[in-house]
Image: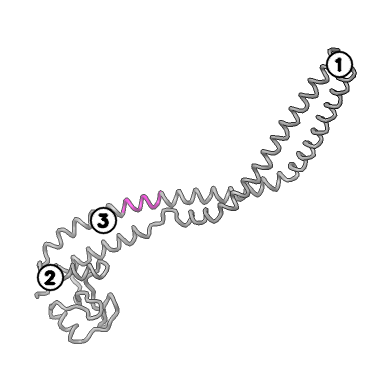
Amino acid sequence: MEAPELDALYRLHKIDAAIVEIKAKAAALDAGQVQKKSMEALKPEWERAKAEQTRVSGGLKDLETTVQDLRAKIDKIEKLLYGGSVVNPREVEAYQQEIKMFRRHIDEAETKELELLDQQPSVEEAYKQVNSKMSALQKEAKAAYEKAVAEKERLEKEYRSVAAERAQREKAVAPALLKQYDAIRARQGGIGMAEIKHDGSCGRCGTTLPTKVVQAVDDGKIVSCEACHRILISVIPSV
């Protein structure tokens, strides 16, 4: 086999190596997975803080409504009592007892309000802090996703360009050599060729090559690495 044909194969190999690199970069794209994991880890704390915040704020609102309703009932009864429409002593006494009961309920509600008001600052601060962390992670995840999408589009464009070039490059390789190379490439993660390093080792698997193998490659013969079976090349052509 003449060296020029080996050079043509090497040029095809460089295209295939670029394709492997593009695929690896695409597979490694981080679309916000790191932030999503952090959000999942933070979620229980956020839910607890949110539940406490809801309990306190909702409790205060409910108690406020309860007190307003009780005061409205007292006002209504007092209007009946002082309006002259109720004159029966037993009815008057019943209404007065009812007012006492409502006022007792108001006292109880206001006591609970004070307790919740004492809790509110710390509860609100705890929720504020954890919610701030969650919001920051959400923004980071969105930014990472958008960056990954843009990079994916760039890689897809680069892949299409390289793949089109490959179709042209493989025409310059002898069919039998191309078949051999593609079979090796299929078994070796897309890389079917290896450069011989200055120290006489395989540039892909690092195996030290026998002198006769290196000489054979220098002579333009098709020789494979005994360890990884990739086709070897020593004089790197201009690509």
Magenta-drawn stretch contains 150: yes
Q: Nearer the viewer, residue 109 or 56?
A: 109
Report whether 23 appears left or right of 138: left
Q: Nearer the viewer, mark 1 or mark 2?
A: 1
Q: Residue at x 77, y 40 (%)?
A: 112
Q: Secondary structure at mark 1?
A: helix
The part of the image, by quadrant, that contains residue 239 is bottom left
Residue at 35% x, 53% y: name it.
151
For badge 1, the amino acid type reads: Tyr
Residue lying farthest bottom? 211
158 or 64: nearer the viewer: 64
Query: Quick one: SS at disc 3?
Result: helix
Q: Nearer the viewer, residue 67 or 175?
A: 67
Q: Secondary structure at mark 2?
A: helix
Instruction: Give the Cα distance between marks 1 and 2.
Output: 111 Å
Number of numbered discs: 3
**In magenta segment, residue 156:** no
For image coordinates 17% across by 86% down, the residue present is 212
Q: Are marks 3 and 1 in contact (CB under 8 Å)?
A: no
* Residue, disc 2: 177
| Distance in Å between CA atoms under marks 3 and 2 | 24 Å
Q: Is residue 115 left or right of residue 149?
A: right
- Estimate the spatial distance between the alpha carbons at disc 3 and disc 1, rounded to whole Å: 90 Å
Query: Nearer the N terminus, badge 3 or badge 1?
Result: 1
Marks 1,2: beta carbons within 8 A: no
Q: Position of residue 70 (x, y in %)?
A: 77, 28
What stretch of residues is rendered in magenta?
Answer: 146-154
Going from N to C along the chain, the mark reached first, 1 or 2, is: 1
